[in-house]
Amino acid sequence: MFRDYCKVLDVAHDASDMEIKRAFRKKAKDAHPEFNSASDAEQQFITVNEAYDILIHHKTRELFEEDLNTYHNPESYPPFKHWIVVARERATVHARLPYKEFTRTKFYQGTHASPYILFLAEFVASIVLIIIPYFLMIGEQNRIFGVFSLFIALPAGIFMLVQALSGFSAMKKFKASKKKASKGDAKMQKT
């Protein structure tokens, strides 16, 4: 049966990578057989790992979303089926590891979301890279170096600026969705 991986991780279909990573980290701990006493704990953990593995890679996520929208079973498409099999095999190996060992795997380590301070540092560095060529061109001795740096530092600064702003945007979206979820939980508790 075809699974809606977004429902498995409790994320929206338009969730950012950061939202998917955070949801996975929470779900992985809750579903790990060490902390989950359910009889199918290992299978739950495998499903959570499989969902993350499919959603975090943009190509497989694109195929998943396309098949979800057309109600087509992606497992009948050989490349997608291959990635599902690979994700399940990796998840099965991870399910048999103690949680502490699992958190040391490269797979789990890759789920760390970039913190706010890194986005801020990238933003500041990008502004510096954008401004430096202009100061170098103003100086009489370094005009050639200033023009040269215009072709190197300016594009690098613009690229870093875009990355930092998209990171801020993703964090803002994540915080808004988290706030909305907590308001929904508060309403549920009142009723």
Image (cartoon, rainbow, N blue to C red):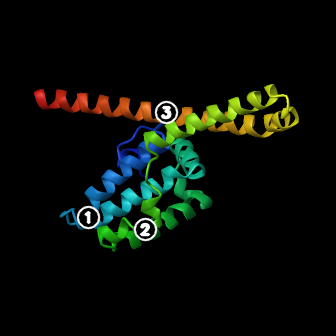
* Quadrant the N terminus occupies: bottom left
Query: In percent of the image, x 43 and y 30: which residue is there?
Result: 172
Q: Residues within 10 Å of mark 1 (few under 14, many from 20)?
A: some
Mark 1 or mark 3, earlier in chain: 1
* Amino acid, disc 3: Phe
Query: Relative to the observer, which residue lies in front, 66 or 158?
Result: 158
15 sits to left or right of 156: left
- Residue 69 seen anywhere in this rendered image of the structure: no
* Amino acid, disc 1: Ala
Q: Is residue 84 above or below residue 169?
A: below
Q: Residues within 10 Å of mark 2 (few under 14, many from 20)?
A: few
Q: What residue did someone put label 1 on?
A: 41
Query: Relative to the observer, which residue lies in front, 76 or 144?
Result: 144
Query: In percent of the image, x 60 and y 50: which residue is there?
Result: 59
Q: What residue did someone put label 3 on?
A: 168
- Residue 153 seen anywhere in this rendered image of the structure: yes
**Quadrant of res 93:** bottom left
The CA span between labels 1 and 3 is 36 Å
Mark 2 or mark 1, earlier in chain: 1
Q: Secondary structure at mark 3?
A: helix
Query: Relative to the observer, which residue lies in front, 128 or 102?
Result: 128
> In the image as oriented, which residue stretches furthest toward the front?
141
Q: Is residue 126 above or below residue 67?
A: above
Q: What residue did someone put label 2 on?
A: 105
The CA span between labels 2 and 3 is 28 Å
